[in-house]
Image (cartoon, rainbow, N blue to C red):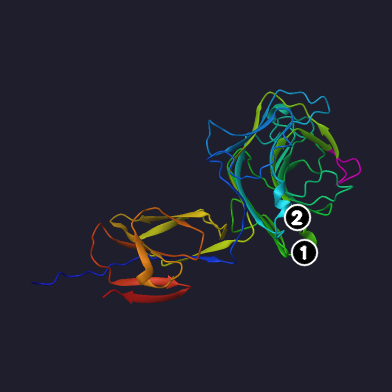
């Protein structure tokens, strides 16, 4: 019986190494898919017309809403907030934070009246998300913050605007303008270490601000918070001597939708080594340089016309380079979880043929080798 001719097939091979710096501790993780999943949320600062709910009309989002109209009369605080004060009792102090959210409006910064005559129907008050030490009384408790905030034009020009705040012991080191549309979905990340502080918006490879100076990095326990309220803040003697007032809540929708929040003590890294050819591409979502332990990462193979994905090879984390402990998976996309070191290989082939693959080019740790199947 004549032997069937075997034709060599080129391959694009993707190797993903999910390598831990150390086993991370999850401090907060909530996707709001089944109500409020984090057991330590604190709602006690909700006041007036503020409400924090998982929106029945948009399942999977935490919905922080100010339901105007509501007068402040100068003294009534209206607020919707999620706080996790229990984080102050957790160690170590340093952590990473990632949150994805959108706002209903740009908090008055697109008002036709401008900062001198802002129209309250374009948003009022303050809103933000990040880490702080729960202090708005800096004279008796020095303020420490690493957060993204938007303060409407009615407040002091020194702090109004949409900015990153980094404040250590009442001394501001960053009021970095964000220059983004708050009504769009954005992902925000804070990397907080004793000798490195970095903040990211959407692009997780390039920080919008960073410092390696320990003197600029808060070193006290901080809580997570996300809020929207009706604060009016002036500073007649300069930062951080706030004089707090309250604004009437207009009859408009003012809210923050939170898709997810993750806070963790250490990170796992995903590195991609790819042999690019003419066979297709592999997409990674989310494509960040660092992930929290437990984060799902989706790998999608996109072959060109006439080619297809043969299979993924998913190695046992305990035997990352041993093909005898590798499982084949034909699902596309493939979801891997950042819970251990992983080694994943994507192999493309011609058309829908089941012919054996002869040369296989594999890149591991930047080294290239050629393997031939027998």
Which of the pair 275/135 is nearer the observer? 135
The answer to which image quadrant residue 70 occupies is top right
Residue shown at the point (68%, 47%) measured from the top left: 178
The prevailing secondary structure element of the residues shown in magenta is loop
Q: Is residue 115 above or below residue 13?
A: above
Residue 59 x/y as whole percent: 52, 36
Question: Of marks 1 and 2, which one's residue comes earlier in the chain?
Answer: 1
Residue 231 x/y as whole percent: 78, 35
Location of the C terminus (image quadrant): bottom left
The residues bearing labels 1 and 2 have C-alpha atoms spaced at a distance of 15 Å
Q: Would you name the residue on which mark 2 appears?
A: 221
Residue 16 x/y as whole percent: 46, 64
Q: Which mark is residue 214?
A: 1
> Does 236 appear in magenta?
yes
Q: Secondary structure at mark 1?
A: helix
Q: Secondary structure at mark 2?
A: loop
Which of the pair 237/85 is nearer the observer? 85
Residue 160 x/y as whole percent: 77, 40
Q: Is residue 47 above or below residue 370?
A: above
Location of the N terminus (image quadrant): bottom left
Q: Is residue 350 above or below residue 240?
A: below
Q: Is residue 352 above or below residue 225?
A: below
Image: magenta residue range: 234-242
Residues under numbered marks 1 and 2 in contact, where contact means CB atoms less than 8 Å apart: no
> Which numbered disc, 1 or 2, marks the residue closer to the eye?
2
Asked whether the viewer can see residue 287, the reply is: yes
């Amino acid at each position: 019986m004549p032997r069937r001719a075997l034709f060599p097939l080129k391959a694009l091979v993707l190797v993903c190494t999910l390598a831990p710096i150390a086993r991370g501790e999850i401090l907060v993780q909530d996707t709001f898919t089944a109500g409020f999943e984090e057991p330590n949320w604190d709602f006690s600062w909700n006041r007036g017309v503020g409400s924090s709910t998982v929106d029945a009309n948009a399942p999977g989002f935490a919905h922080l809403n100010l339901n105007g109209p509501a007068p402040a009369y100068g003294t009534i605080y209206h607020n919707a907030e999620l706080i996790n004060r229990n984080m102050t009792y957790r160690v170590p102090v340093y952590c990473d934070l990632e949150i994805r959210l959108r706002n209903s409006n740009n908090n008055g910064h697109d008002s036709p009246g401008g900062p001198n005559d802002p129209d309250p129907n374009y948003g009022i008050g303050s809103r933000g998300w990040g880490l702080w030490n729960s202090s708005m009384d800096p004279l008796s408790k020095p303020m420490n913050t690493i957060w993204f905030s938007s303060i409407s034009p009615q407040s002091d020009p020194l702090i109004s605007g949409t900015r990153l705040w980094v404040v250590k012991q009442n001394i501001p080191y960053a009021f970095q303008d964000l220059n983004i549309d708050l009504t769009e979905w954005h992902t925000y990340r804070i990397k907080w270490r004793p000798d490195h502080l970095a903040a990211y918006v959407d692009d997780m490879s390039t920080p919008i601000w960073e410092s390696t100076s320990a003197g600029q990095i808060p070193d006290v326990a901080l809580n997570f918070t996300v809020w929207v309220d009706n604060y009016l803040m002036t500073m007649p003697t300069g930062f951080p001597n706030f004089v707090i007032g309250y604004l009437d809540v207009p009859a408009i929708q003012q809210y923050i939708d939170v898709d997810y929040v993750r806070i963790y003590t250490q990170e796992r890294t995903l590195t991609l080594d790819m042999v690019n050819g003419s066979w297709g591409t592999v997409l990674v979502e989310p494509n960040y340089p660092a992930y929290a332990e437990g984060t799902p990462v989706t790998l999608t193979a996109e072959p060109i016309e006439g080619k297809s994905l043969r299979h993924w090879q998913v190695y046992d984390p305990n035997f990352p380079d041993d093909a005898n402990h590798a499982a084949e998976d034909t699902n596309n996309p493939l979801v891997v979880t950042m819970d251990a070191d992983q080694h994943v290989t994507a192999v493309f082939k011609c058309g829908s043929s089941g012919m054996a693959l002869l040369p296989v080019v594999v890149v591991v740790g930047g080294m290239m080798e050629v393997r031939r199947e027998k």
